[in-house]
Amino acid sequence: MAVPAFSDIAKPSNDLLNREFYHVSSANLEIKSKAPNGVSFTVKGKSSHEGKTAGSIEAKHADPLSGTYLKSLRAVVSTASQTHNDLDFQALLEPGNAALLMFYRRAGLTLTQAWTTANVLDTKVELNDKIAKGLKAEALTQFIPSSQNFGAKLNFYFKQPNFHGRAFFDVLNGPTANVDAVLGHEGILVGAEAGYDVNKAAINRYSAAIGYSSPIYSAAITATNNLSVFAASYYHKVNSEVEAGAKATWDSKGANAVGLEVASKYRLDPTSCAKAKVNDQGIAALAYNVLLRPGVKVGFGISVDTKNLKESAHKIGTNFEFEG
């Protein structure tokens, strides 16, 4: 199995405990479509139980790796760079005209732009496996027209058979740097994370984790928030229809109590599934997800405060996803 990122060491149990429980918002809507030229669009909308509504529209275009050449020249002398395979030099020779041109092959960039209802413009440019094998680079910008605030970040992801490292740099805010790394061998995972504030010249956060991962089950122990919050999680795929998991959390700087969550997922048939979970606070949640037809998915969720059944703390939510 591939070595996960540091934040994904406990991903199987976290997904089972948190994903596809639709009571968190009163309504969710997601629409995905893809144009003939390869540009994909995603529209998201969310309505909270407090009555607030948020949404975004996103466009993503992946520029395939290819060459760039001029086809209408009478005589072209071309040579490739000896230091970079994507760089070409061309000498254009025509009666009364001569030019030396340099072309850079399209490097397989992926451009994603989003505009939210909070009037925030996000742009992301990705370059995967071109700088070095296994290395993905991202440049992210954020612009808020109302306040003229501008943000810029650089992210790097590096994957090898037994290693997964990441580095996140906030160029304008701080600047700050957050790096994490995970080593894996035969399912055993060991990872660490650290954050550094350049202006303060100090480490401002650090975490550590160990785990074990296999296709059938996984377990992880994490120590986050400067090794003050400890969590132990477990996930088990009982069979093709049943999944189960649990997570215990203890905050050494807070109360002495240990938080506990238990969840299970049951696949009713190839197109639908049901989930249930309960925590130590007596909050029970149920969810149902069904694929009505290819590209149309509907989900329903409810949470109940079993300790206060007469109170109005219960929540109901719906989710609609369309993809074409």
Image: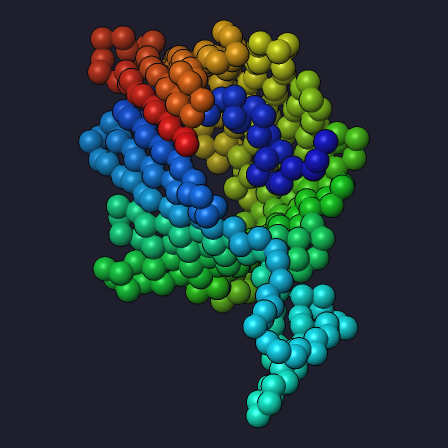
Foreground pick, 65 / 297 = 65
Q: Residue at x 59, y 69 (%)?
A: 71
- The location of residue 180, given as percent across then percent down, is 62, 48
- Splitting the image into 4 quarters, where does residue 296 fall? top left
Report whether residue 136 is seen: no
Position of 49 with respect to 168 (left or right) is: left
Colour setting: rainbow
Q: Residue furthest bottom?
A: 96
Q: Residue furthest left?
A: 51
Q: Is residue 184 above or below residue 65?
A: above
**Screen quadrant of the C terminus:** top left
Specify the quadrant of the image occupied by residue 307: top left
Q: Position of residue 206 (x, y in %)?
A: 58, 47
Please report the residue visible at 50 percent of the width from the left and 7 percent of the height from the top: 268
Left or right: 43 as drawn, with respect to 199: left
Q: Nearer the viewer, residue 321 or 151?
A: 321
Name the side, left or right, on which 47 lies relative to 300. left
Q: Residue at x 72, y 66 (%)?
A: 85
Residue sitting at the far right: 186
Q: Number of labelled discs? A: 0
Depth check, front residue: 324 or 90: 90
> Is 46 left or right of 286, judged from the image as shown?
left
